[in-house]
Amino acid sequence: MSHQISLALGISEDDLLNCMQCGFCLSVCPTYKIIPKETATPRGRIALMKAVQDGGLVTKDITESLDLCLGCRACEVACPSGVQYGTMLEHAKEVITEQTNFSAPVKAVRWLFLKQLLPYPKRMKWIRGGIRIYQKSGLQKIARKSGILKTLPWHMGAFEAVLPEVAPFRAKLPKRVEPNAKTNKPTVAFFSGCIQDTVFHETNVSTMKLLEAAGFPIVTPEDQTCCGAVHAHAGEVDLAKDLAKKNIEMLERSGASYLVNNQGGCGAMLKEYDKLLADDPVWAERAKAFVKKVKDINEILAEIDELPKLYPMNVRVTYQDSCHLTNVQKVTLQPRKLIQSIPGIEYVEMVGAGTCCGSAGTYNIVHYDESMQILDAKMINVINTQAEIVVVANPGCQMQMRMGVQRAGLEGKVRVMHIADLLAEAARLK
Amino acid sequence: MIDPQVKQRLVEIVGENWVLDQPEELVAYSYDSTPMYQELPDIVVLPKTTEEVAKVMRIAYEYGIPVIPRGSATNLSGGTVPLKGGLVLALNRMNQILEIDEENLTATVQPGVITQELHQTVEAKGLFYPPDPGSLRISTIGGNIAENAGGLRGLKYGVTKDYVIALEAVLPNGDILHTGGKLAKDVAGYDLTKLLIGSEGTLAVITKATLKLLPLPETKRTMLAIFKDLTDAARAVSKIIANKIIPVTLEFMDNGTINVVEDYVKIGLPRDVEAILLMEQDGSKDQVDRDIEKMAEICRQEQAVSVQVASTAKEAEQLMTARRMALSALARLKPTTILEDATVPRSELAPMVETIKNVAKKYNLMICTFGHAGDGNLHPTCLTDVRNADEIKRVEKAFDEIYEKTIELGGTITGEHGVGIAKAGYLEWKVGKSGIEVMKGIKKAFDPKGILNPGKLFTDQPRKRVVIQS
């Protein structure tokens, strides 16, 4: 097949033509469920990209439709043709970003987060420190009382309300962990993530303890950086590529056999570095080697079959899939198996567990209303399970589900826990 | 271009959010699942009630605007492509299951209900709605009725038309028509219910349907038989039926399809065989066991090289994998997938498959055939590339020959996809001149101004598939 690149969007024509418009993707698209229009479907979005390529539309016309997409990739799994929707979306977003004249505040926020904060773990720590002071000094109480939070842009007040108590500034993951007993297990490098370590540092601690208890020597490379997922989804593909290269070098330097992470979204991005760098003669092969080593915590724990001793927890639990863990990494059975390996747990499968909760990176900030519609529908399914714990596998989902619990008036009745925290609690490692 | 005044009146009926006319919105409603057809509408309207549909139709009638009713646009004959522009009437918001009547065993639904959702809803009550088109996970009941959709269970249970007993539909002038009822027997005048089924949106807009339900079969079993020789497989099919066994599904895959599937899923299918038959039977446990054993025995007698009977649901699932993956595997090979539905009497299966194979060879094309052997409804699927003009010409010629042969064998040009644009050139082959005349007369009686789905079913054009550049 010829690989003609569309001048308009940089999408391969073959990829565009590969969609046979059968519509199977409509049945799994979360945005189509809340907006019954063809422009809110993967098939529609591909048709729009095609139209841009054919000159029937300009990129400005299709921005809204593509922006509304969560990027959950459920359509790729449903697609009989194997259409590379995620790749096409990324290309289109890159072009749209190049052509968009963002307003000054949006520009500033993008610059701050994408370029100045996320790529620098040390700076993210300062953010954590700042949040900690706010939470501990009484400022939070004053702010919440005064009603000032309601006036913040981008629904920041709603997010603030479900922010967990973050770890202190000084909290740090160990650089090296050697298991107590000598094992023949390979050394793993731990990928701590930027948002994960800022908001849910505790989950990283749990994850490392689980790996240690399972007998893995662990290193936490200090030269790791953000995975680049937020950048790629925001159309800053070049920035994402830079970050990818840094992480590939990091893993090579570490000499570890695996790179373990506990974030469904970040893990998916790491596992797609080969796609991201496919056209780069210098990096393509290195990216392929890197991808082979990336593992989600669910995968590595489910594979070894010798978890630390788990004590009974008499509680009803359900699981909310992380889209990228499911649709990109294809990890669905492992978390369920791990949850059910805890004695006494009553596991209830939620209806539509595999459909997006609406967090989707920064989607819940940018498209707050749509995101909340998706979330509220999800919460009905959560309530129907009558579970006391909703288990998650990604920090975005964790924040979103915390918000869902609050919106459904279930605070104090339902806990949202990362699977690593649940297992660490059952193993009494916490 | 739609007159701003008309747009304003449409907005007053359905609300601003549900009238679409931005360039990207028009592009999104310019196609269906049929390759190589595309045409922009002028405006898209998404009504919520029958009353709204009636009001929209009145305006369209007054101004002579073409109206194209649309569900999920999964049809494969160009039926929802707005060939003459106009107004796409998207019925997705009318998606309520209005009633499940357990005394009369009926379901009353709006046209935008998704087929699979109806299945799940009625099955949860121990009831059964058999029609199961391949697109059921997203196709709408309204679309199923408009196209008279078939499916895998057609052999034993029939198709959509066998389950629709009452309809509410809006006529082109905005009048509301009611046909049939919750009745097993009803011969009051012409059967307008049946007339609207399969009318492809050319006579009226279906706004409500009452469907007949059955008790859910107690159990189901699956088996798979592999044949070196196509004639043996066809004989096995005929013999199963001759033995008074009507399996719920009797699916067929030819050598081309088998190889493509094996390349894709690697489940150990033999590559040098001419046919795989996949069979299922449902009903009471004793009956199912008896039928499955008998079918296995018949396949062995007819030289099947292997016969596998699933004993668990999981094994059944594995046996079904090949058939389930057929479309996926085929679709991945080439950019353009043309899925057709040539249909012959069951007894003519072998000569038909043989013809397809020879025609493909003659025109140097890749055509793989799978489909419903039990009811003679085959899906010769041509894998091609729309950018290759020369090949597309050969595809047209090949399908001309294939349809020629179906007619010759007493078959039809379309078993379940409908005529739309894609088969309009062949319709006269099947129904003859007088058939066309009668059909045109019916069309005129319903739609004197010709505003409903114009350019479908009937054509003055020679048979030619073209890519319409918008």
Image (cartoon, coloured by chain):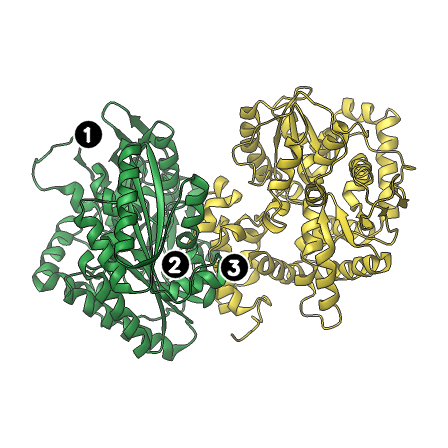
Chain colours: A yellow, B green
Q: Are marks 3 and 2 on the same chain?
A: no
Of the two numbered discs 1 and 2 in the rendering, the one whose residue sits closer to the viewer: 1
The reply to whether discs 3 and 1 touch (Cβ–Cβ < 8 Å) is no
Q: Residues within 10 Å of mark 3 (few under 14, many from 20)?
A: many
A424 or A28, which is in the foreground? A424
Residue at 56% in and 51% down: A64
Badge 2 crowding class, 10 Å Cα cut-off, few under 14, some 14 to 19, many 20 or more, is: many
Name the element at disc 1: loop
Q: Amino acid at mark 2?
A: Tyr
Q: Position of residue A76 (x, y in %)?
A: 53, 53
Q: Position of residue B6 (x, y in %)?
A: 34, 49
Q: State whether discs 3 and 1 lie on one chain.
A: no
Which numbered disc flags the more N-terminal residue, 1 or 2? 2
**Under tag 3, what secondary structure?**
loop
Q: Contact (CB < 8 A) between labels 3 and 2?
A: no
Residue at 58% over, 60% down: A88
Amino acid type, residue under disc 1 in the picture: Lys
- Which residue does the numbered mark 1 point to in the structure image? B182
Q: Is residue B452 visible?
A: no
Quadrant where the N terminus of chain B is found in the figure: bottom left
User: Can you give x and y, in whole percent of width and height, for residue B192 in the image?
Assistant: 14, 42
Query: SS for tag 2?
Result: loop
Corner quadrant of residue B160: top left
Q: Chain of mark 1?
A: B
Rendering coords of residue B103 (x, y %): 24, 22
Residue B182 in view in this figure: yes
Question: Which residue in the structure is indicated by mark 2?
Answer: B31
State the residue position of label 3.
Answer: A83
Tell me the tag on residue B80: none
